[in-house]
Amino acid sequence: MNPLEFDLRDGCPALSLSRTIVAGLVVAATCSIATAWTPLARAATVDPANWPLLTPPLARDEHIEQQVQRWLARLTLPEKIGQLVQADLGSVTPAQARRFHLGSILNSGETGPGENSRAPAEHWLKLADAFWSASTDRSDGRAGIPLLWGTDAVHGHNNVLGATIFPHNIGLGAANDAELVKAIGQATAREMRVTGQDWTFAPTVAVVRNDRWGRTYESYSEQPAIVARLSAALVTGLQGAPGSDEFLKSPHVIATAKHFIGDGGTVNGVDQGDNQMTESQLLDLQLAGFTATLDAGVQSVMASFNSWHGVRLHGHKPLLTDVLRGRLKFDGITIGDWNGHAMVPTCRPGDCLPAMNAGLDIFMVPEAWQQLHQSLQRDARSGALSPERLNEAVARVLRVKLRADLFDAGAPSSRAVAGQWAQLGSAEHRALARRAVRQSLVLLKNESAKGKPVLPVMPGKTILITGPLADDLPAQMGGWSMNWQGADTSKRDFPSATAISVGLKQAIESAGGKTISASDATGELPAADLAVVIYGERPYAEFKGDRPDVDFQPDEPLSELRRLRAAGIPTVSVFISGRPLWVDPELAASDAFVAVWLPGTAGEGVADLLVADASGERKHDFTGRLSFSWPAASADATVNAEQTNPVPRFPVGYGLSYQAKR
Ligand code: BGC
């Protein structure tokens, strides 16, 4: 147990400080926010009959169910409990996983093989084999159920050095191309299988209604229909089609719809906060991604950190059990979020029967997993945890493992594509990422300067490439990229990446133009035909990424744009961000403005749209359209379509193209 793990009794959100050390600051901030959403006295009720009754995409498989029953009859209590406990890589060894019969492990954004999150790919696979061998060791008569390794591969296999990192979901929402997203799911699964992981905690199906939330970029859209369509496509790409032979088998993986339910609708967009929507709003706005991914056969659903009218989802039996199982007919694994169970009243990370009784099957309990293993055994022995609930949870885990053919799949290194290092960041995946970048960019402004629209950049010109993020790979990746918050990373963490500025330079120069870089441009402004200014948000993730409003704060880019304009140099803003932000002054100071979101490793995709070829022909046109309303004021964090107030600066669906202006 990390000595810094803070006490949850004060009602602060669960945060294991080992996860990061933004901690000191974030805990203080989060705890003070927590008091702002202290659970309300009145609890809202759920009527399951209001929720859709789904038909599961996979019919009951008698053969699998018989095997599940045989295992249940054979497993000892510690073996059963082990299936329900998921430890973090940083706090468990293969020998311990064997001793405690752990059914799964995860790596967080900050843990990797040998306590090195930047470990080479070979080490990941070797460790996957070590955990698998330990879990399947039957030498002393133990059952030896193979373990699963879960990871947050949320925009590519983003924790592993050299992997392809695709645009974050907000950019894919702007692309709104289900076939593209499915292909990204396939590529991500493939790269995961190269290094031996079985299970990703993706997609996030949040429908974000307040852009202050630091996880806005994990969402495809503020619109349920876009979220439904794209999240189902990702699941199909990751898992394969339900009922087909490829389903869940390598090079496919298990997917997770997260976070059930209401994470995108908390008051003030507070991370882990309280969702106070009515039941019908929850149904209309927050459910679509779950029904769509369940229809696509998603095999795990992650409970959300947030509460609904003051009741934490991890302890919410009506939603976790009566709705998710009873109405939506989910028969896979309900997994908790990182110590999320500890937020339920009376619970601690190592002791939380209420979450189990509410319907959690696997506890994500990164550090206190031994304590939880013991307390659940105690509860089972005392009868507080009924044999029925215990067996149901274990059955769900086994069912998914059997569907994935885990018992016969052999060691991770023996499965399809394992160890094929060239697949990590392969040319094929890079081309896909580049296409995704191209499709995700949204052109918000393209005005005439000197008689012609400034974009595309024409051949033979001298272009100044500048701005604080001109050569900033971590900013281009955003959070959940080699590290949880995307902080403390540098170029060397993204060996297969091209910076946006590098892509621009290559494209401009190969069209006979000349580029002047930011470093050449200090002091006196050089003579240039056009300036491309690259700026925006620096990386963040959950907790840390929440903001008080949607005002894009830093003044420097604006001063730079104005300085360039004053010198008669037309300006193009390339805006990197995880959400739409109020940028009216920057828009006014730019001749063209492009929202590039968090594009990932294929920065050259930006130049594909911005730069014409040597004959002056545009290579591609903009097809990206906003999947989030763009605010017209810094206070308009809740600007969403279908509302008359506030009025957006640009509505959902907006986006210019070269061919026809909208
Ligand atoms: C996040 C989840 C993530 C988990 C494991 C949590 O803090 O909310 O989305 O899957 O950590 O890293």
Image (tube, grey):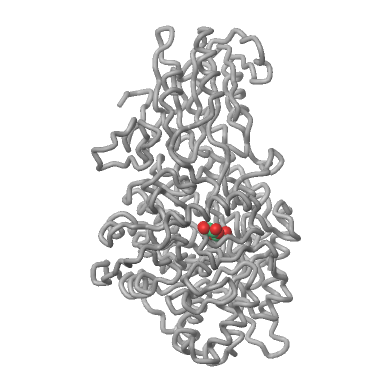
Tell me what residue is drawn at x 67 percent, y 72 percent. 132
Across and down, in percent, residue 477 comes to: 58, 41
Instruction: Tell me: residue 106, above or below residue 459.
Output: below
Q: Nearer the viewer, residue 342 or 201?
A: 342
Give the number of marks: 0
Quadrant housing the N terminus: bottom right
Tell me what residue is drawn at x 43 percent, y 58 percent. 236
Instruction: Tell me: residue 528, above or below residue 553.
Output: above
Quadrant housing the C terminus: top left
Q: Nearer the viewer, residue 254 or 581?
A: 581
Tell me what residue is drawn at x 70 percent, y 70 percent. 92
The reply, left or right, for residue 404 in relation to residue 175 is right
The reply, left or right, for residue 152 in relation to residue 222 is right
Instruction: Tell me: residue 452, above or below residue 482.
Output: above
Q: Quadrant of ligand 1?
A: bottom right
Instruction: Tell me: residue 192, above or below residue 647.
Output: below
Across and down, in percent, residue 564 comes to: 54, 13
Across and down, in percent, residue 538 comes to: 57, 37
The reply, left or right, for residue 519 in relation to residue 503 is right
Across and down, in percent, residue 182 comes to: 45, 52
